[in-house]
Amino acid sequence: MTAPGPAIAPEVGTELPPLSVRVTRADLVRYAGASGDFNPIHWSDRTAAAVGLPGVIAHGMLTMALAGRLVSNWVGDPGAIRSYGVRFTRPVVVPDDDEGALIEISGKVSALTDTGPGERIAKITITAAFEGKSVLGRAVAEVAVPPS
Amino acid sequence: MPDASFVGKALPPTAPYRVGREKVREFALAIGEGASVCRDVEAARAAGYPDVVAPPTFAVTFTMPAIEAFLRDPAFGWDYSRMVHGDQSITLHRPIHGGDDLVTTIHVDDLKTRAGSHMLNLRCEVADTDGAAVATTRLLLVTAAEAGS
């Protein structure tokens, strides 16, 4: 069950097309509603300051989801992703302006495994950076890719 | 102080959560996921899915409320206000799609306390209403040490 996506011929070391995503306060509000995570550190400057944060921060799960798009864009089908894990290492501070915060996402194929007739799993090692610093650690996705 | 006697235990399964087609679309829009199988039923069916496909991290939207209910239960004794999300992983045994009815069982895998900071490892086993495994999510939650501890 894989939707027709771009023709990909992954090899170990193949770099995925990078992705830059701008996150504004409006995006945080939209994600709060869609995900049900209404923690006020993601929309209230007052609450963020009270708990010692430098400002309102993006939901870690939003950053994780945005970084996951690197992989779904590449294979063309989010349903092909078999596993995805991250550590949250640094918050993404989102200012109350039109620019928001820029997250730069890249990744490459770090392993390829034949898992059965006509199926291979590609392990993708992902990096996500904000202001030049990594915000996700050990970010790895496993995704079904066409057989060689 | 969280109650370590919960470690190794599973909580009672949740009531089934119905994965709504519009909820999947709303979630895909919120994360900027443009894949047609997430938004268009016909595209999803053409690709072999019964209905729109949920992006992988969608699983956390229905497991998190069950986790929050557990963490806010005074019987467990977790300081919810001082919590940060340390890590998260999601394994999909099959894609989640619109129309799924999913039951979550939370397992308390580990609890460590170091220098007044608590580290809690939870695992959610997500199954359909026939008991077939759909997803496994794992997360680490951390509470900062209280001042002076």
Image (cartoon, rainbow, N blue to C red):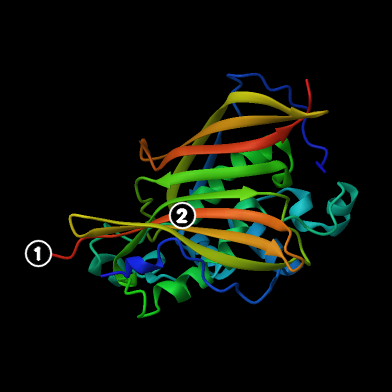
Q: Quarter of the image containing the C terminus of chain B?
A: bottom left
In this view, B133 is above or below A68:
below
Direction from residue B21 to residue B139 in the image, left or right: left
Could you say which is closer to the camera, residue B69 or residue A99? B69
Direction from residue A123 to residue B143 in the image, left or right: left
Which chain does the residue under circle 1 lie in? Answer: B
Q: Are marks 2 and 1 on the same chain?
A: yes
Could you say which is closer to the camera, residue B149 or residue A15? B149
Mark 2 to mark 1 CA distance (whole Å): 27 Å
- Relative image position of residue A101 (x, y in whole percent): 42, 49
Give the residue at x 35% y 51%.
Answer: A91
- Relative image position of residue B136 (x, y in whole percent): 59, 54
In this view, A43 is above or below B44:
below
Give the residue at x 36% y 40%.
Answer: A131
State the residue position of label 1: B148
Give the residue at x 35% y 80%.
Answer: B74
State the residue position of label 2: B139
Q: Residues within 10 Å of mark 1 (few under 14, many from 20)?
A: few
Give the residue at x 58% y 19%.
Answer: A13
Query: Can see residue B32?
Result: no
Q: Amino acid at mark 1?
A: Gly
Q: Quarter of the image containing the N terminus of chain B?
A: bottom left
Which chain does the residue under circle 2 lie in? Answer: B
Which mark is first along the chain, 1 or 2?
A: 2
